[in-house]
Amino acid sequence: MAKNKKSAPTLMVPSRIPVLKTYKMFVGGEFPRTESGRFYTPRVKGRSLGNFCLGSRKDVRQAVAAARSAQAHWANRTSYNRAQILYRIAELLEARRLQFIQDLNHQGSSERQAQAEVDMSIERLVYYAGWCDKYQQVFGSVNPVASEHFNVSILEPMGVVFHIAPDNQPLLGVISIMAPIIASGNTTICLASESKPISAVNLAEVLATADVPPGVVNILTGSLDELAVPAADHFDINAIAWNRSNGRRNKTTLQMIEEKATSNLKRVRRYERPWTRLESQNPYLIADFCEVKTTWHPIETISESGSGY
């Protein structure tokens, strides 16, 4: 008579709370937590995206200090070297293409939208890499003057640019402004999208391994309402790039930034456009973050005896 076989015990899997990833900021080539110790958890379609640093006024100051210390060295790099580094960022973004598509999916983009945004981001980096050694020839000039002088105008970087990234197109929107800013020798502090910050923070991991010198690009996360004031007040920020929609709440913040920017004559550049359009990439975005420097040089007059006077 066959013996009754004992049934295998049922494995009981207890319900668990998923461990959310904690994302840090990117300042001076490192990944610090906010000095305030605060964090927030944005949600998309009922899903938590993770824990993100809620930046403070002191974080803005530290990012500006890192950007300022790196700016002169970055501006003195050859245009060819800056082009190499922008192209290197594109290479690494290509290698991590599937990850960034997944990040955009997680933040609410469809598969098709995510693929298009990542592919266009890569192409945009290559586009501005190609302009690094050409924009001077387009925007510089030899000016006609009535006196015996050479008069030459060239573009020089403004310095430190604070970039307020958009909530839509959270990867392409960041790259479409970051690339022309650093192409000419500026350094930048990017305030990532408050509601969809994953793409910008993961882009920092690409930048950290792409030969970008520490401090050239810094990425903060947090509330625009809290960080806009110290950015607008800071005397060591030369320009602010506004890259968000012009809703009622944002319009009030933008007006405050423009008023406070007059304290040290900051340039405020406003960009409210769909970055997926091909015409959204152009060398004029590089010129937007440059100053025009004009140099006068006397022409030596040769006398009949052959000596100058």
Image: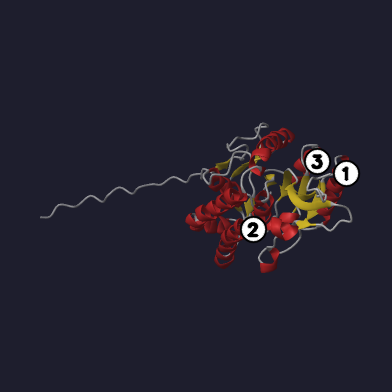
Earlier-in-chain disc, 2 versus 3: 2
Q: Total label count? A: 3
Q: What residue type is labelled 2?
A: Trp
Q: What residue type is labelled 3?
A: Val
Front label number (3 vs 1): 1
Taking depth in this image into account, of 89 and 27 the one nearest to the observer is 89
Q: How far apart are marks 2 and 1 (CA)?
A: 31 Å
**Residue pointed to by mark 2:** 131
Q: Looking at the picture, how far across and down is residue 10, in whole percent?
A: 33, 49
Q: Distance between the residues labelled 2 and 3?
A: 33 Å
Q: In which image quadrant can residue 119 be found? A: bottom right
Q: The N terminus is located in which quarter?
A: bottom left
Report helix, strand or loop for mark 2. Answer: helix
**Residue pointed to by mark 1:** 262
Report helix, strand or loop for mark 3. Answer: helix
Q: Taking the image as drawn, is residue 32 in sight?
A: yes
CA neighbours of label 1 inside 10 A, class few (<14), some (14 to 19), many (20+): few
Q: Looking at the picture, how far across and down is residue 23, in whole percent?
A: 58, 42
Report helix, strand or loop for mark 1. Answer: helix
Q: Residue at x 70, y 67 (%)?
A: 279
Q: Residue 229 carries which label?
A: 3
Q: Distance between the residues labelled 3 and 1?
A: 13 Å
Q: Looking at the picture, how far across and down is residue 288, in whole percent?
A: 76, 54
Earlier-in-chain disc, 2 versus 1: 2
Q: Residue at x 83, y 46 (%)?
A: 257
